[in-house]
Amino acid sequence: MRRFTTIFAALFLLVATLTAPAAQAAAAAALSSRTHLFYYPWYGNDSGGYRHWQQGGHTPPDDVGANFYPVLGPYDSGDLTGAVEQHMRWIEQSGAGVLVYSWWGQGSYEDGLAAGVLEAAARHGIRVAWHLEPYSGRTASSTVSDINYLLSRYGSSPAFYREGGRGAFYVFESLRITDWTALDQVSSSAIVLAQTTDTSKVAHFGGMYTYDAIAGATAPGWREAGAFCEANGLVWAPSVGPGYNDDRAVPGNTTPTLSRDNGATYDREWQNALSTQADWVSVTSFNEWHEGSIIEPARSSPPPFGYETFAGAYGTSGAASETAYLDRTRYWASQLGLPSVNLALGKTASASGSQGGFPPGNAVDGNASSYWESANNAFPQTLTVDVGPAAAVGRLVLKLPPGWGRRTQTIAVGGSAPAGYVFDPATGNSVTITVPAQRTVSLTFTGNTGWPAGQLSEVEAYAS
């Protein structure tokens, strides 16, 4: 019996070895390489005591420095077969293909855990990019050394993320350093992103990102940054988050709180990012528990220390709410993966009526400042765009001029029931709608709280 058990075990190992690469490839294909999650490996609960969980003067395990309580409790980032393995399963569930590893310099605690996280990520088809944090003494030259170190030490891992053969490196608080000329030394091997929307501060960088989960709600400067990156061959990776609350981790801090609003905040930030034609969308964060910006599952019945929960997010409650933000990330990651060619641009547009000087062609001219306006005080009104027989539209982006005041327009898309769509200057006066595949965009307007007519500056249509 022992001999047959040994043979069976050997055969099982052989089959697993042969099928593992195929399984990993299939997993990677199902994930979005354009969706990046900021990942923090700085937690500990080993024999040396708790690490990070006690921030703000708290006493783990039940009392931790966060406004939400992890499903896993105050875990150890070095628990590769437990917490880290579960993280990779959850990241798979989110549809994100890349985690951005918080790294604090050569020989740091986080550096010591990197190899194990890369191995765990590889088993799940997940790739790893790098978040270069502002450790003491960081300079432009040391950053170049760090990039070369990471490429040399971890570059052979199958989980090491590359785009066009180059590794990806986000530099947090890049504005602390004014001269980044040294980055030219690694431009052929690394895409290095600056944390800013100030286009005058990105010389020598390969792209831009924002990180700030609070700013994502209003997206200041995002359109300009996206346009600059598009024009200059740079990567634009705006950052989105579900909310922000660091009250327990930083008592007395004056940083404003950003409510999750049952998921509406996360949706709004994703819409802001997609409306700027992002190359990548970086999510703040998978597990920055101190700032309450996590999508990692939070316990629906936490210990009695005044924690918040995800209850109500996207209509969920109880245990189902714990993974609500993972599931919503998968939805948005799928939208990001859709083709980015505007099929309506320059196509034929017609309307049931127009106000003089504001014809339907203004809605497909690529200019967000020009607009179509229907005949006034004469609802319903229709606007139709024929994108052509070879196209099947699955996503619409409707826009008004960015400086216009907030309004709700009641619109029926195709044969759907009318619905109210909010155009808010705080979110770029842009609305994203997923629709069944169709070749003709037909919009029927029956109301507008801002003006007695149908109005649109742009109809953008993207393939299903």
Image (tube, rainbow, N blue to C red):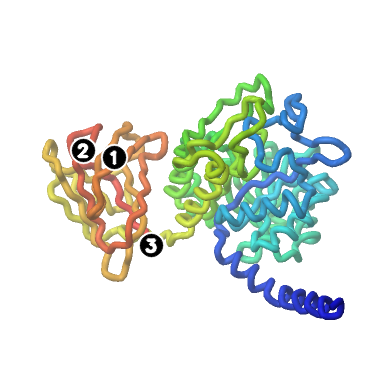
Residue 259 is left or right of residue 353, and the answer is right
Which of the 4 image quadrants contains residue 118? bottom right
Looking at this view, is 193 or 382 the one in front?
A: 382
The residue depicted at 24 percent of the width and 32 percent of the height is: 449
Between 205 and 445, which is closer to the camera in this rendering? 445
Return the disc, 3 or 2, that comes first in the chain's sequence.
2
The quadrant of the rendering that contains the C terminus is bottom left
Q: Which residue is mark 2?
A: 447
- Of the 4 image quadrants, the one containing the N terminus is bottom right
Q: Which mark is residue 464?
A: 3
Task: Identify the secondary structure beneath mark 3.
Answer: loop
- Residue at coordinates 48% horizontally, 59% vertically from top-left? 337
The amino acid type of the residue labelled 1 equals Gly
Q: Which residue is mark 1?
A: 420
Callout 2–callout 1 Cβ contact below 8 Å: yes
Q: Is residue 174 left or right of residue 354?
A: right
Q: Is residue 456 above or below residue 81?
A: above
Three-letter amino acid code of the residue under disc 3:
Ser
In this rendering, would 59 be left or right of 238? right
Q: Of the residues under marks 1 and 3, which one precedes in the sequence?
A: 1
